[in-house]
Amino acid sequence: MEFKASKYNIYLIEGNKFYIFNQLTNALSEFEEDLFYVIKNNEISEKKISNEEKDFLLSSNFLCDYELQEELIMLQRNRIRRYGNHHIRLTIMPTLNCNFRCWYCYEGHIASKMDSQTIDKIISFVNKLILSSKISLFELGWFGGEPLMYFEDVMYPIAKYIKKLCNKEKIRFRHSITTNGYLISDKTMERMNEIELNNFQITLDGSKEFHNKSRFAQDDKNTYDTIIKNITNLCRQISNVGITVRINYSPKNLPYISQIADSFPEDIRKNLRINPQIIWQYKEGVNEITSKVFEQLSIFAQKGYDVENIYMPSSRGIGCYTENMLQYVVNYDGLLYKCTARNFDNKYSIGYLNEDGEHVSNANYYNYFMSSFFENPSCLKCEVLPSCAGMCIQKKIENSLPFCPKESIYNSVIGQVRLIIQQRNT
């Protein structure tokens, strides 16, 4: 069998050290200079590579079968993740209302609350999903609005039921929430442990000065300190906790986001994954500031935070969770959606739950069965396809103009690899 270097390898020289990273396997290894250039220059031969080296290089996908069209691996993973997986992902919106009024938020915050009839429909829907499918993982998530506004009335009873059903059916249960982190109390955390709610995404809008200018409650202009305190308490009181601290940045606040690093006690920093995300109104200029983002992340890494794999390719073959056809978003009113990054009005709905908890689909639902965005000649030949997987299918459905983020994706992966190397060498 003849071999070739994977087209999804990324080659990096740091000082006098030589590294190769493969985007399909996320393998990262240091190489001797001679072997590094043999692979990089695709000068593969039995004379230059021992059998032991060959086995390692093949298992990591640094090398592959000469005849292999590697993009077919992405297509295979895509089909499995979209149609052949055993993973239910259910996101529930107890309300579209919120206790904050962030200027950049795309949602219209209306006074709303999920009623008991919709809760019953969701429970029936979950029963049907679990009992009619061969499910190995049920991932329950909460979104809003601010879901914790109705923790006791909506979140707790639904989650308690689903967790119990998963235990009975021997299905793995994963539980997460996207929240502003302001309404967390000791009583809430006690209940969170009971329902195994232990994965959190909580947002800060930069350092304290910037955060408090854009992320405030009606009667509190210093939400930063409250959120920091609540994150700290979560780390100390929630079992098996994992917290992603999403940091919204703009060109203006980016130079100061590393100030957040000193806000948390050292003993909890290992539980905090730092995830900077540009505010969507500024996305056009993201390429120019990618290196500055990693400069800030490097400071977090030095201070004991988890910054690994933030921008690493998932290699899952889909660009977004929306493409999983066992993924649903249930709004407070019982309407069903696929995407959480759009307004929750009828034009984006995929149907509704009827009185028996059945999904009554509409025409829009079937749009999500179309081919993924990357299934075109340009994307399929691209060397960063595993790190990108194309634009979200939601944008394809909306007939958005194609946009190629290749430069940004490549720079992000390079920056992440450098961070991992930095952490390994400290």
Image: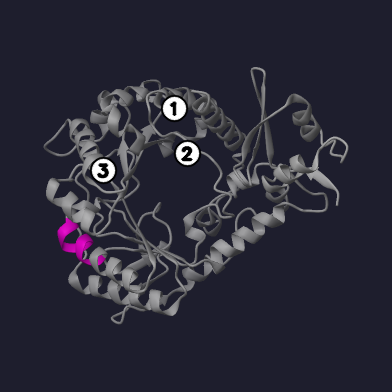
- Look at the picture and state if 136 lies above or below 26: below
Q: Which residues are magenta?
A: 150-158
Q: Does the segment drawn in magenta span residue 388?
A: no
Kindly report which numbered mark, 3 or 2, lies closer to the viewer in this rendering: 2
Q: Amino acid at mark 2?
A: Ile
Residue 175 on image: x %, y %:
33, 56
Q: Which residue is mark 2?
A: 310
CB under 8 Å between callouts 3 and 2?
Answer: no
Which numbered tag is attached to residue 188?
Answer: none
Q: Is 153 part of what is drawn in magenta?
A: yes
Q: Secondary structure at mark 2?
A: loop
For numbered disc 1, what is the local secondary structure?
A: helix
Dot 3 alpha-carbon crowd within 10 angstroms: few under 14, some 14 to 19, many 20 or more: many
Badge 1 vs badge 2, beta-carbon distance below 8 Å: yes
Q: Residue furthest bottom?
A: 356
Q: Position of residue 62 (x, y in %)?
A: 71, 41
Residue at the image point whose x is 42% and y is 27% from the top: 301
Residue type of the residue flagged with mark 1 = Leu
Question: Residue 197, how many percent across, how many down?
Answer: 28, 54
Q: Nearer the viewer, residue 90 or 56?
A: 56
Which of disc 2 and disc 1 is earlier in sequence?
1
Residue of label 3 = 180
Scheme by which the image is coloured: one colour
**Element assignment for label 3:** loop
What's the residue at 34%, 76% (across, down)? 127
Give me the C-alpha separation between circle 3 and circle 2. 20 Å
Residue 386 left/right relative to 198 = right
- Is residue 124 visible in the rendered image? The answer is yes
Q: Against 15, is 74 above or below?
A: below
Which residue in the structure is indicated by mark 1?
A: 297
Residue 285, image x and y in percent? 51, 30
